[in-house]
Image: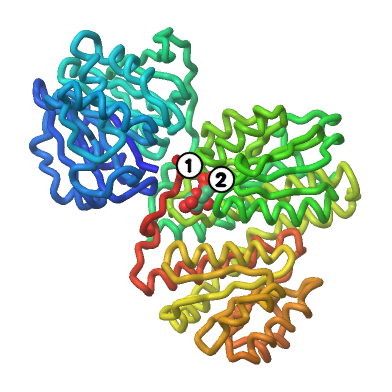
């Protein structure tokens, strides 16, 4: 949450910062601001609202000639979104400016001392104490030393970038728990919360790690630990295409990302299927044969949509690899006295690789001596770097706050993992070959579903004004129902619940009347007849039924008010198809209701606070 960016170089600083903030806006969007140095002047413009609002009002002329600056887009934690609480924050004299992503946990105690020493704190944020502490130390020492001294006094998480009038040729950045990447250009440097703000300037990057402070000029970078020991750092190259972070003619990133799924699903399995042998290869797992054979239990840990993917993983692995699986909410894991034993394998699932709860749960599991793998999208993210091994889903940057393509890519990787484990246990090469042949067809099947986007739009038009929705599925389709409901509530603010279809009788059935649309996932599988019975229960109470059914199933039309057909496929791959119409339904309803689909209220793409 919160996006930060800093630039030093010869380009128009205000433009670079605003463009960078646009890319990072998915991280938070309730207030925004930039600060830059022009000779001996520190210029700041900040306000409540979005990047576009600031851009409209920004006095670009005032920033002409600046060569160093910082910017911030906020997701409020301490203090409501308003002009004063917006970042950058300044010291008492207006000499130093700072942007921060994270939470300073001991800010109240520091604030008290600062006020006693005569500092004037203007905002209600936890952040502002940082810049006043830096002010205090910077009276007698360099900016980088002042930042280092400050950070030894704070508890909590931070990604920060600081500039000072006294040292106008540099910026200082530091990280603990909030992501930070430095882009190294030719005579310019750009530091940001993620690579999307960097790639249009340079592909050469350096990942800043927890406990590191970086002193940056336009041509040099020096990295220190918190005791001010200089560190040797490696650089990396980002290889994804900039097209991923453009809308490319789509009205919203979410729709673009839904339509990318044939390609992203393929990217998730590309190079990982050995068809002849009916097996998959996942080299990044870094598990020996002995370790693989001694797995007694798998524990998936995740949040939000990634948690739903974990539930699908549970159905897959338990059925095909016969390994017991548990799925934990990351935010609960540490507080439920987890019992971890020899033979347990923890797998954390996170699109961003930065979710604070997931990261904390992962560290807890590691501290208990268990092997931890990560399924992540963002290359070089904290989870990717701190896990013992793992698999990248290769979905490319996901900008829409509501996750779509990352979900189907996570499922694809979980399918590959299922084969990887099952083929070592009960699955024959022939069965493996047959299943994998089907899996390879999935991108084309997804494409055919996307071709019927208008059918979903028509259903969305009919139901856009309803206040409640129920989503029901059974077996492996139950997590898909949860995901469908989550998509709808996230972006359209309609209350929606996902339930196991038969569980409806134990409560939600009381809600059903002619005003309750019920979305059933009712494909032809072993629970089909039972789901049809549940549908009849809804019908008898005059509920409106939208069914996701298997092509060729005419029978279902007797029970459902609307039927959307998906092609038949193997059960393992079926969630990859059934979730697509649910993503589209949520999307169209949200658009029809005039909601901001890509930036739903109160949400953030990457939740880096606990
Ligand atoms: C936020 C996002 C969700 C996402 C969840 C977990 O709530 O809005 O879309 O599913 O975080 O994020 P992760 O990056 O760990 O998958």
Q: Whole-percent x and y of residue 217?
A: 28, 17
Vertical relation: 534 (above or below) 171: below
Q: Whole-percent x and y of residue 443?
A: 63, 58
Which of disc 2 and disc 1 is earlier in sequence?
Answer: 2
Q: From the viewer's perspective, tell me whether residue 56 is left or right of residue 22.
A: left
| Residue drawn at x 63%, y 37% as measured from the top left | 374
Vertical relation: 164 (above or below) 33: above
| Residue drawn at x 25%, y 11% as measured from the top left | 142
Q: From the viewer's perspective, tell me whether residue 237 is left or right of residue 196.
A: right
Residue 102 visible in the snapshot: yes
Name the image colouring. Answer: rainbow
Which one is in front, 609 or 8? 609
| Residue drawn at x 63%, y 31% as measured from the top left | 387
Give the label on residue 459, or none. Answer: none
Q: For residue 501, which quarter of the picture? A: bottom right
Query: Within 10 Å of the Cα at label 2, are there few (<14), some (14-19), or many (20+) other Cα atoms?
Result: some
Q: Whole-percent x and y of residue 211?
A: 45, 20
Give how far apart the Cα atoms at labels 1 and 2 are: 8 Å
What residue is pinned by disc 2?
Answer: 331
The answer to whether the residue bearing label 1 lies less than 8 angstroms from the nearest atom of ligand 1 is no
Mark 1, secondary structure of its residue: loop
Q: For residue 216, which quarter of the picture? A: top left
Query: Within 10 Å of the Cα at label 1, are there few (<14), some (14-19), or many (20+) other Cα atoms?
Result: few
Residue 9 visible in the snapshot: no
Name the quarter where the N terminus is drawn: top left
Q: From the viewer's perspective, tell me whether residue 460 is left or right of residue 200.
A: right
| Residue drawn at x 85%, y 34% as measured from the top left | 294
Mark 2, secondary structure of its residue: helix
Give the number of callouts.
Answer: 2
Marks 1,2: beta carbons within 8 A: yes
Which one is in front, 126 or 251? 126
What residue is pinned by disc 1?
Answer: 610
């Amino acid at each position: 949450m919160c996006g930060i960016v800093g630039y030093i170089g010869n380009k128009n600083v205000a433009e670079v910062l605003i463009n960078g903030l646009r890319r990072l806006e998915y991280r938070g969007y309730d207030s925004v601001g930039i600060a830059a140095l022009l000779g001996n002047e520190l210029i700041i413009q900040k306000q409540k609202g979005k990047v576009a609002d600031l851009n409209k009002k920004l006095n670009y002329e005032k920033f002409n000639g600046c060569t160093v600056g910082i910017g911030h887009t906020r997701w409020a934690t301490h203090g409501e979104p308003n002009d004063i609480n917006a970042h950058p924050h300044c010291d008492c004299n207006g000499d130093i400016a700072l942007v921060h992503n994270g939470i300073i946990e001991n800010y109240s105690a520091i604030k008290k001392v600062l006020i006693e020493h005569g500092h004037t704190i203007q905002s209600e944020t936890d952040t502002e104490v940082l810049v006043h502490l830096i002010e205090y130390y910077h009276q007698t020492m360099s900016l980088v030393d002042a930042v280092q001294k400050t950070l030894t006094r704070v508890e909590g998480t931070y990604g920060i970038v600081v500039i000072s009038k006294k040292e106008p040729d540099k910026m200082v950045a530091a990280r603990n728990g909030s992501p930070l990447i430095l882009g190294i250009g030719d005579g310019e440097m750009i530091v940001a919360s993620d690579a999307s703000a960097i790639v249009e300037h340079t592909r050469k990057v350096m990942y800043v790690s927890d406990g590191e402070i970086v002193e940056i000029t336009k041509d040099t970078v020096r990295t220190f630990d918190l005791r001010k020991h200089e560190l040797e750092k490696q650089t990396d190259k980002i290889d994804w295409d900039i097209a991923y972070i453009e809308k490319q003619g789509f009205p919203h990133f979410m729709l673009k990302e839904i339509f990318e799924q044939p390609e992203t699903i393929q990217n998730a399995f590309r190079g990982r299927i050995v068809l002849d042998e009916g097996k998959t290869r996942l080299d990044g797992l870094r598990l020996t044969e002995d370790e693989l054979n001694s797995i007694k239990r798998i524990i998936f840990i995740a949040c939000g949509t990634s948690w739903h993917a974990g539930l699908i993983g549970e159905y897959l692995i338990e059925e095909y690899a016969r390994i017991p699986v548990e799925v934990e909410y990351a935010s609960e894991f540490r507080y439920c006295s987890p019992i971890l034993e020899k033979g347990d394998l923890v797998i954390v699932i996170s699109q961003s690789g930065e979710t604070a709860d997931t990261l904390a749960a992962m560290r807890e599991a590691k501290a208990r001596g268990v092997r931890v793998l990560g399924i992540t999208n963002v290359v070089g993210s904290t989870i990717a770097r701190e896990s013992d091994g793992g698999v990248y889903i290769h979905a490319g940057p996901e900008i829409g706050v509501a996750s779509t393509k990352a979900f189907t890519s996570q499922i694809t990787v979980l399918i590959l993992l299922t084969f990887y484990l099952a083929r070592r246990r009960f699955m024959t090469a022939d069965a493996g070959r047959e299943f994998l042949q089907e899996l390879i067809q999935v991108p084309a099947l997804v494409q055919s579903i996307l071709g019927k986007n208008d059918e979903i739009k028509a259903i969305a038009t009919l139901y856009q004004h309803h206040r409640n929705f129920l989503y029901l599925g059974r077996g492996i389709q139950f997590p898909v129902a949860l995901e469908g409901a989550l998509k709808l509530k996230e972006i359209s603010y309609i209350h929606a619940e996902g339930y196991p279809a038969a569980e409806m009788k134990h409560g939600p059935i009381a809600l059903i009347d002619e005003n309750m649309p019920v979305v059933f996932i009712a494909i032809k599988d072993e629970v089909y007849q039972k789901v049809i019975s549940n549908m009849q229960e809804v019908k008898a109470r005059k509920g409106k039924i939208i069914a996701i059914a298997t092509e060729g199933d005419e029978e279902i039309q007797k029970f459902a008010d609307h039927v959307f057909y998906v092609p038949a496929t193997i059960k393992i791959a079926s969630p990859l198809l059934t979730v697509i119409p649910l993503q589209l339904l949520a999307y169209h309803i949200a658009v029809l209701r005039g909601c901001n689909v890509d930036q739903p209220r109160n949400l953030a793409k990457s939740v880096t606070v606990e």
